[in-house]
Amino acid sequence: MLKLISEKIRTEASDYSIETLTELSVHFRAVKTTEKDNTVINCTYFWSSWGSLNYGGRQVFSEEKILVLVRLRPLGEKEIARNEVSDWECINETTILFRNSLQERSMFPTAHTFDRVFRGDCSTRQVYEEGAREIALSVVSGINSSIFAYGQTSSGKTYTMIGITEYTVADIYDYIQRHEERAFVLKFSAMEIYNEAVRDLLSADSTPLRLLDDPGGTIVEKLTEETLRDWGHLKGLLSICEAQRQIGETSLNETSSRSHQILRLTIESSAREFLGKDNSTTLAASVNFVDLAGSERASQALSVGTRLKEGCHINRSLLTLGTVIRKLSKGRHGHVNYRDSKLTRILQPCLGGNARTAIICTLSPARSHVEQSRNTLLFASCAKEVTTNAQVNVVMSDKALVKHLQKELARLESELRTPAPSSTCDYAALLRKKDLQIEKLEKEVRELT
């Protein structure tokens, strides 16, 4: 069994250690980074005698479904003034029910079940604590995570994401204060996708940014990344993002978001006792806070001119997102068209990739929005069938990597000498496969030494 450097990874609910992992069989996939002369290792855990790894009071497997939450907002002032009625009701913690019994709606399902649903009187704090918190805080343990807000315009997405972001960051800084044995570095970046152009929200320059392909995912060229000093520094940057983001007035919302916003917080942490040593390792992961612009019907939003153009781009990118989600929900068979929009291209790792993901679908209960609400629930139903493959991301020094590769090489040579007995085993094919693995490892060792 492979041994890792002593690392303490704790969560709010429980502690666990990867200091030796002698009971676990660990498979490494190495990818060279361009930023540092180090190697990022994605550790996919295969459980043997332990069966699973305990994380935050629950079992974390290498594969899991996207967590889908539904938040039903109360009727707004304009809706009340129009004497709108509420057609949706959360009848328990997991089921939302359509109350309208009109015959023309009988072809649609009336009840929808998700991981968690929240009534209109539930606070954003409750949505965070009972829904998004566990996934958001995976980042402190080296696991990428993403929180989405999806729904029609004026359904409460931005309001929800502002609260989720603040509560998550507050908990992260609280975690850092309670774990002085580890050294943390926090970095922040922010972007928006406006009319299919990517803009840096931390820069006054509105020049569109290019997207570049990378083995670890799509990179946004020249995107500003600030190293954070403290919580106050981040609050100031969030204020800048809010001021820079494209918003506009429509008949449905006086401050409608006209772009998709992606806030990214990257956390790197190392055990202080190993800092500067040859065998040091670092946990590195990012949490994305994604506030999607709302889908809208031009006839309802009364959009014309610039607002109409914005709405067309928003709806087109959300349509692509919905298509990607539907294909992923049916399994990873065939081509998935991530590149059909900037949004899905940037978020590809979060959609069935190396990340834990939660999607908060926001709904208006008003009868006038029933069609958009049904579309949102259809999206949510597909999303809950999508599987992600979250992994612990460990940055190893070159010397530590060479040692690992040498051990892996010795293990493969040992397997060649004593193959496992099997009447159906194709030994020639097995030997060819092992020889290729050994050649690959020897090449990597030569490159690093």
Image: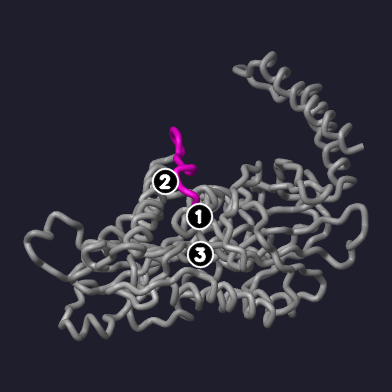
Q: Which residue is mark 3?
A: 261
Q: Nearer the viewer, residue 328 or 213?
A: 213
Q: Residue at x 45, y 34 (%)?
A: 335
Q: Nearer the viewer, residue 412 or 131?
A: 131
Q: Mark 3 belongs to which amino acid?
A: Gln
Q: Is residue 426 above or below residue 210?
A: above
Q: Main secondary structure of the magenta part?
A: loop
For residue 6, the mark is: none
SS at badge 3: strand
Q: Which residue is mark 2?
A: 324
Callout 2: 10 Å neighbours few (<14), some, many (20+)?
many
In which quarter of the view is residue 186 placed?
bottom right
Q: Residue at x 51, y 70 (%)?
A: 245
SS at badge 1: strand
Q: Position of residue 356 (x, y in %)?
A: 55, 57
* Mark positioned earlier in the residue sequence (2 or 1): 1
Q: Which residues are magenta?
A: 332-342
Q: Position of residue 252 (x, y in %)?
A: 29, 74
Q: Is residue 228 left or right of residue 361?
A: right
Q: Is residue 91 visible?
A: no
Q: Is residue 333 magenta?
A: yes
Q: Depth-wise, is mark 3 or mark 2 nearer the camera?
A: 3
Q: Is residue 398 left or right of residue 361?
A: right
Q: Which residue is mark 1?
A: 197
Image marks 3 and 2: residues in contact by CB distance under 8 Å? no
Q: Residue at x 63, y 80 (%)?
A: 235
